[in-house]
């Protein structure tokens, strides 16, 4: 009804510094209630065309600003996001289903920090220079922005991952057309409202909302967008690679994972257990870096399992806006069914579900009965070749299995198509070092998880991605390099 639709939050595309309505819209759900609360533009070729045109128009002026001028604008934007931190956190939690605590402490602070970080790092790059004295030559490199960058981001860490692309892209002098996930578009739209105040010129950052198939693909196929930075699933990345191939586009692909934790019998369990609970269940297990295969050395296997399961049962599932809640809602009804489906498959194969889905009962507040919730779930005795040990589940489900030797566990940990992140737990520094070297994984955390220095490369091996992001890596991706030779 009209009365109903009036109450909905209506998003608009942001093109050339202006909010513009779209001819059709998509419903967006509040995952914690199951209700439609927002309508997102269903953009297509036409909207993408207008956004690319605006970005092309803005490029000559933005790219000729000094790094210091751009840096000041990025810092201002970081200030404005920090100033509105609570409003952004509330919006992210409502839109995504994540807990307000996670949004307040991780998503939004990091989104602001992404701008601050690249505002700083852009000031500190040096190019290369070599000499060939015998032929009287010196060579040096020069870096320039590429042009219009196409940025496509997923729904799990909406503003966090989008700004991780926008910040380095514009710091380097590119202009951008961004397409956030159609399921979590609200915080990107809120950020657009701050751009003018921060001093970002019109057309430097354009955001088109809509689905991957329509808006995303129009961006990937646009001839005037020479590079695409994508974070999302491996399947979508394959499609993007195919679609962009005729244009020979530069691609950065940050994809899925099936991340192992390897726990040796000399691990400090008082550190390892709480961290492995977080690495398995933080943000409902909807982080590409989440642990979903836990290999425990035989001697401590039963003790680990007992303590781990007892602690997992303490995680409180419920209304994401309740600050005492640890696990919020999953992103959608379809995704919840998919994640639960994996637990059923494991049971059918003879694995043991030790806690969570199908074992314990979930009591939800009255207002959240139709939300997409599930309990943290621990599965044991799963075969390595089982789909639960091979495929990315992307929910609060983790598998625990026993191992005997170092050599064996390295082979098993590497026995999946993915290679994003791993954790290794041991108090033997030699062993930690040996194992870390042999793991096929873009990131290895030993005796910790998720501690990041943004200076260093982030990204995956194998089906987890192509390319790296970080201070130097993002700078290289978002610039074109030229080698110049001068002879005296
Ligand atoms: P997804 O691949 O379905 O969607 C990601 C984005 O791509 C969305 O904006 C979507 O609309 C768009 N898209 C979909 N089809 C497209 C197409 N044909 N052309 C262009 N764009 C298209 O992924 P998701 O479900 O939103 O996110 C979850 C996935 O993201 C998981 O696999 C997770 O591991 C991965 N992820 C990876 C990282 C990382 O840094 N490696 C970080 C977070 C999430």
Image: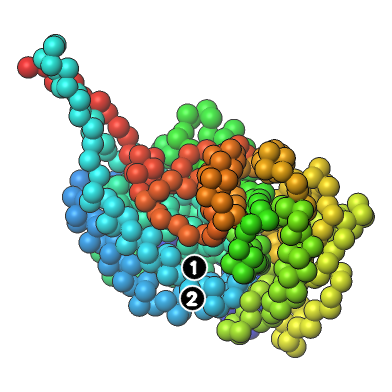
In the picture shown, does residue 14 fall above or below 236?
below
> To which residue does mark 2 refer?
104
In the picture shown, does residue 187 fall above or below 487?
below
In the picture shown, does residue 170 fall above or below 478?
below
**Helix, strand or loop under label 1:** helix
Q: Mark 1 packing: few (<14 Cα in 10 Å), some, or many (20+)? A: many
Instruction: Please state if 75 lies on the left or on the right of 113 as rendered.
Output: left
Please name whichever residue, 278 or 463, is drawn nearer the observer in this view of the structure. Answer: 278
Residue at 49% from the left image edge and 69% from the top image edge: 106
Residue 408 image-quadrant placement: top right
| Residue 33 visible within the image | no
Q: Could you tell me residue 258's position as x and y percent?
A: 67, 49
Residue at 62% from the left image edge and 48% from the top image edge: 256
Residue at 52% from the left image edge and 50% from the top image edge: 429
**Helix, strand or loop under label 2:** helix
Q: Could you tell me residue 426's position as x and y percent?
A: 59, 54
Q: How is the image coloured?
A: rainbow
Q: Could you tell me residue 384's position as x and y percent?
A: 79, 45
| Residue 170 visible within the image | yes
Q: Could you tell me residue 332's position as x and y percent?
A: 70, 65
Instruction: Please state if 230 lies on the left or on the right of 1 as rendered.
Output: left
Q: Work out which residue is located at the far top of the displayed protein and give it.
A: 135
Disc 2 to disc 1: CB gap under 8 Å: yes
Q: Work out which residue is located at the far bottom of the displayed protein and give it.
A: 366
Q: Quadrant of the N terminus?
A: bottom right
Q: Mark 2 packing: few (<14 Cα in 10 Å), some, or many (20+)? A: many
What numbered label is drawn on residue 107?
A: 1
Mark 1 and ligand 1: say if the CB distance to the nearest ligand atom is below 8 Å.
no
In the picture shown, does residue 458 fall above or below 248?
below
């Amino acid at each position: 009804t009209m009365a109903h639709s009036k109450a909905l939050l209506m998003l608009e595309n942001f093109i050339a510094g202006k909010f513009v309505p779209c001819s059709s819209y998509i419903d967006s759900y509040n995952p914690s209630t199951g209700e439609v609360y927002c309508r997102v533009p269903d953009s297509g070729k036409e909207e993408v065309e207008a956004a690319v045109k605006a970005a092309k128009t803005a490029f000559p002026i933005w790219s000729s600003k000094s790094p210091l001028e751009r840096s000041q604008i990025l810092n201002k934007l970081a200030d404005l996001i920090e100033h509105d931190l609570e409003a952004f956190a509330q919006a992210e939690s409502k839109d995504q289903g994540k807990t307000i605590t996670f949004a307040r402490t991780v998503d939004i602070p990091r989104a602001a920090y992404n701008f601050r970080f690249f505002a700083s790092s852009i000031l500190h790059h040096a190019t290369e220079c070599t000499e060939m004295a015998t032929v009287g030559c010196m060579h040096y490199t020069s870096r320039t922005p590429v042009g219009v960058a196409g940025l496509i981001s997923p729904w799990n860490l909406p503003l966090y991952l989008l700004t991780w692309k926008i910040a380095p892209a514009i710091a380097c002098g590119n202009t951008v057309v961004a397409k956030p996930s159609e399921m979590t578009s609200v915080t990107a739209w809120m950020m657009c409202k701050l751009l003018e105040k921060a001093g970002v010129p019109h057309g430097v950052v354009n955001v088109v909302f809509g689905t991957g198939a329509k808006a995303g693909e129009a961006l990937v196929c646009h001839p005037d967008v020479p590079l695409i930075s994508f974070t999302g699933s491996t399947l979508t990345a394959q499609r993007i690679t195919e679609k962009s191939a005729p244009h020979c586009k530069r691609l950065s692909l940050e994809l899925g994972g099936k991340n192992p934790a390897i726990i040796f019998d000399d691990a400090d369990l008082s550190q390892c257990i709480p961290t492995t609970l977080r690495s398995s269940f933080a943000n409902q297990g909807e982080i590409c870096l989440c642990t979903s295969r836990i290999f425990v050395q035989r001697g401590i296997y039963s003790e680990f399992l007992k303590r781990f399961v007892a602690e997992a049962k303490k995680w409180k599932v419920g209304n994401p806006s309740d600050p005492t809640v640890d696990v919020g809602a999953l992103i959608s009804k379809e995704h919840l069914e998919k994640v639960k489906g994996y637990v059923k498959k494991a049971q059918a194969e003879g694995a043991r579900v030790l806690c969570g889905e199908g074992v314990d009962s979930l009591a939800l507040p009255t207002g959240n009965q139709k939300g997409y919730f599930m309990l943290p779930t621990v599965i044991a005795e799963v075969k390595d070749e089982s789909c639960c040990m091979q495929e990315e589940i992307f929910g609060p489900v983790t598998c625990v299995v026993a191992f005997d030797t170092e050599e064996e566990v390295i082979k098993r940990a590497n026995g999946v198509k993915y290679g994003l992140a791993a954790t290794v737990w041991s108090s033997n520094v030699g062993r930690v070092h040996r194992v870390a070297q042999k793991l096929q994984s873009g990131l290895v955390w030993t005796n910790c998880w998720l501690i990041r220095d943004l200076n260093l490369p982030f990204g995956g091996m194998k089906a987890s991605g192509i390319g790296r992001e970080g201070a130097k890596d993002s700078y290289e991706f978002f610039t074109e390099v030229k080698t110049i030779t001068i002879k005296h």
